[in-house]
């Protein structure tokens, strides 16, 4: 196992489950389509060449295990032994997150409910969200005898409208105002989830003093308020020195931004919808891997996106095959020392 660097990635699988497994009450894959999906997904994992991968839209663990029983991964030297695999909840009715790791998994926790300190409701403002739409997976990985990291895998609420349907009242989901209200509800939930995820990050940093990396489909661009809720903001420059230094240690850094500062090209998008090219999938690293930190344990090197399979359906009659993901994959190389 290499110790001078490691590669870590995030992969939205788009409803990965076996043919007989119901997804939203349906079984969407024939055996032939499922085989194609496994082969395509395995080929993407080979291209990613990652030691650690966080997954989203994984419905069951056996479907993930199937990837290592079939070509091309079965014949590959990338995973000569089946890697450690986790899923957020085996019995949860809905898409889950998962984790692949070449490194030993020391501990792992599944978090469904928001930390109490992160709840947003006040006596004057009722925000009813108190749990994640998809539980969060927190795992401590042992990279070397001297270095452990905590990986947090998350999939926040999408931008898809959350319609408030009431018994006996017919709702026109094509009505522009209803669509706006539905997207606003989704935005509120995503903001609440992002705040709760920030609380988990802060608690983990305080408890372990070890590096933290967040992987996931956060359903927002890097500059969106929701994403910045998770990373935190650089401290105000007129703060007292001790408080300012403390806040620097609590920040997360988006590898997308790190790459953009190191290169003159910025082509970061992992999803295309209705002609909009967006970077929804992110790798966020703690201050331990920030170049600005003189006491850093390592640094972010190359950040790669695997998005050449994505199709802009506003410009092309081509459609994404059913067995492919509608997201690109992101991989960051972390150099240690």
Image (spheres, rainbow, N blue to C red):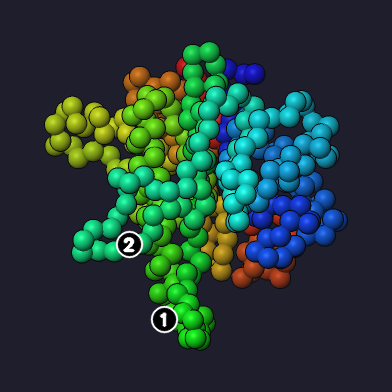
- Position of residue 221 relative to residue 298, above or below, is below
Task: Left or right? Give the position of 35 relative to 142.
Answer: right
Q: Is residue 222 visible?
A: no
Spatial CA span between label 2 and label 1:
21 Å
Of 70 and 63, the residue lying toward us: 63
Which badge, 2 or 1, comes first in the chain's sequence?
A: 2
Decide: few, some or many residues near mark 2? Use Cα within 10 Å; few <14, some 14-19, many ≥20.
few
Place of residue 205 in the rendered image (x, y in percent of width and height, measured from the top left)? 37, 30
Residue under pointer 2 = 127
- Position of residue 37 relative to residue 170, above or below, is above
Place of residue 304 in the rendered image (x, y in percent of width and height, measured from the top left)? 58, 40
- Position of residue 176 relative to residue 155, above or below, is below
**Residue 177: image tag:** 1
Secondary structure beneath label 1 = helix
Which residue, as the protein is rendered here, is positioned at the far top? 145
Task: Left or right? Give the position of 16 relative to 160.
Answer: right
- Position of residue 150 relative to residue 314, above or below, is above
């Amino acid at each position: 196992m290499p110790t001078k660097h490691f590669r870590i990635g995030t992969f939205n699988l788009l409803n990965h489950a076996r043919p007989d497994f119901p997804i939203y009450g349906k079984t969407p894959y024939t055996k032939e389509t499922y085989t194609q999906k496994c082969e395509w997904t395995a080929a993407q994992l080979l291209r990613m060449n990652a030691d650690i991968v966080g997954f989203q839209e994984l419905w069951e663990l056996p479907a993930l295990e199937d990837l290592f029983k079939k070509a091309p991964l079965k014949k590959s030297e990338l995973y000569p032994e089946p890697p450690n695999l986790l899923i957020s909840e085996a019995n949860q009715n809905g898409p889950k997150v998962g984790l692949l790791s070449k490194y030993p998994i020391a501990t792992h926790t599944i978090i469904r409910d928001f930390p109490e300190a992160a709840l947003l409701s006040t006596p004057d403002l009722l925000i009813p969200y108190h749990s994640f739409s998809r539980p969060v997976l927190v795992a401590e990985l042992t990279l070397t005898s001297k270095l452990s990291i905590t990986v947090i895998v998350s999939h926040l609420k999408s931008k898809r409208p959350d319609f408030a349907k009431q018994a006996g009242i017919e709702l026109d989901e094509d009505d522009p105002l209803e669509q706006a209200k539905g997207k606003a509800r989704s935005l509120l939930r995503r903001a609440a989830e992002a705040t709760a995820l920030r609380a988990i990050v802060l608690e983990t940093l305080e408890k372990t003093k070890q590096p933290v990396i967040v992987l996931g489909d956060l359903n927002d661009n890097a500059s969106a308020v929701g994403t910045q809720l998770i990373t935190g903001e650089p401290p105000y420059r007129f703060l007292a020195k001790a408080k300012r230094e403390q806040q620097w240690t609590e920040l997360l850094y988006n590898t997308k931004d790190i790459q953009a500062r190191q290169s003159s090209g910025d082509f970061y998008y992992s999803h295309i919808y209705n002609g909009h090219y967006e970077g929804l999938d992110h790798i966020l690293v703690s201050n331990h891997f920030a170049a600005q930190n003189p006491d850093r344990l390592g640094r972010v090197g190359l950040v790669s996106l695997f998005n050449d399979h994505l199709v802009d359906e506003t410009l092309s009659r081509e459609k994404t095959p059913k067995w492919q993901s509608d997201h690109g994959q992101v991989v960051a190389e972390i150099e240690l020392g």
